[in-house]
Image (cartoon, rainbow, N blue to C red):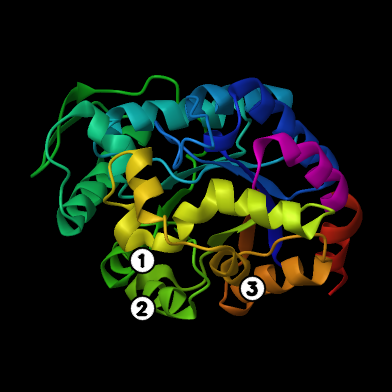
Amino acid sequence: MIEIGYTMMCEQAGPKQLVRDVVLAEEAGFDFAVISDHYFPWLDEQGHAPYAWSVLGAAAQATDRIPLMTYVTCPIRRYHPAVVAQKAATMQLLSDGRFTLGLGAGENLNEHIVGGVWPMAAVRHEMLEEAVEIIRALWNGDTVTYRGKHFEVESAKVWDLPDTAPPIGIAVSGPRSCRLAGRQADIMIAVEPKAELGTMFDQAGGSGKPRVGQIALSYDPDPDVALKRAMEQFRWFTGGWGVNAELPVPASFDQASRTVGLDDISEKMPCGPDVEKHVAGIRAFESAGFTHIALIQVGGDTQEQFMTWAATELLPALRAA
């Protein structure tokens, strides 16, 4: 049976609310929780971007059983991989072994803030592979000196290590990232229900490993309210990752999505109170071979309402089958 997760969407809620929401998700019966790691929201209308790692530490203390995961952290620009290794090890300790480190090659939106040129996708994947090598080496407990094409590490050691290192997930969107994930990841991560991604992951060494997907939905008792909220806050997602990885600021996403209409949103995102419509969207990931699916409820101020509906209608409908 697939596992259903909840997304702490940093772009649409402040830090205290995100912690409250993951507590509600645990009480509602979600199987796991993921968190986005952004420096900017996608659009000004979303209005938030707290530091995900502080939220994770608080969430680890506020919850008891729900697994936690970054979805995803970029360890190649804003964070050096040696620092990510230390943060993730600390999270594994704080959560008593409930943490998974989800990694990706990043978006310009969040990484440009440290300056320099935004690398081409092929270079970002080279950097990501080096980053994973550094993280795993530091988790072995040794003092690490590393001289790579893109990164250097000088006599680094992570002093507080868990007995079991966190699993590493890698986000994929095409052949190059699938090959990287197949070589280096314990888990495949993707945001599109494409079976071919899993096939390429398998061919590169990922056979039998979990695959975590993510779907945005907009629940509301009023379908028009749900659709308009999705249009206001999530129209950016229709651009696809080839575009979304390159744009630098929220205003760019606003401009790029100016021609998106309500019909476009309705076609691509489940909106409204119809449980079967939401179930069908989630089942598309299951049919594509995903073992875990994290849900995003669009709208920071709608999470409590969503939790009640999910606990009483959506999750039972998903598990009944």
Label 3 Cα neighbours within 10 Å, binned few <14 / some 14-19 / many ≥20: many
Q: Does the magenta stretch include residue 155?
A: no
Name the element at disc 1. Answer: helix
Asked which quadrant contains residue 3, the reply is bottom right
Tell me which residue sits at (59%, 69%) in the image. Answer: 263
- Residues at marks 2 and 1, CA–CA distance in whole angstroms: 7 Å
Residue on which disc 1 sits: 182
Q: Of callouts 2 and 1, which one flags the residue occurring earlier in the amino acid sequence?
A: 1
Amino acid type of the residue tagged 3 in the rendering: Glu
In the picture provided, is 26 more to the left or to the right than 144? right
Q: What stretch is highlighted in magenta?
A: 297-310
Q: Where is residue 1 in the image (x, y as percent from the top left)?
A: 74, 69
Residue on which disc 3 sits: 286
Name the element at disc 2. Answer: helix
Quadrant into which the C terminus falls = bottom right
- Residues at marks 2 and 3, CA–CA distance in whole angstroms: 20 Å
Amino acid type of the residue tagged 1 in the rendering: Gly
Residue on which disc 2 sits: 203
Amino acid type of the residue tagged 2 in the rendering: Gln
Judge whether 84 appears above or below 317 on screen.
Answer: above
The mark total stands at 3
Asked which quadrant contains residue 295, the reply is bottom right
Depth check, front residue: 132 or 124: 124
Circles 2 and 3: CB atoms closer than 8 Å: no
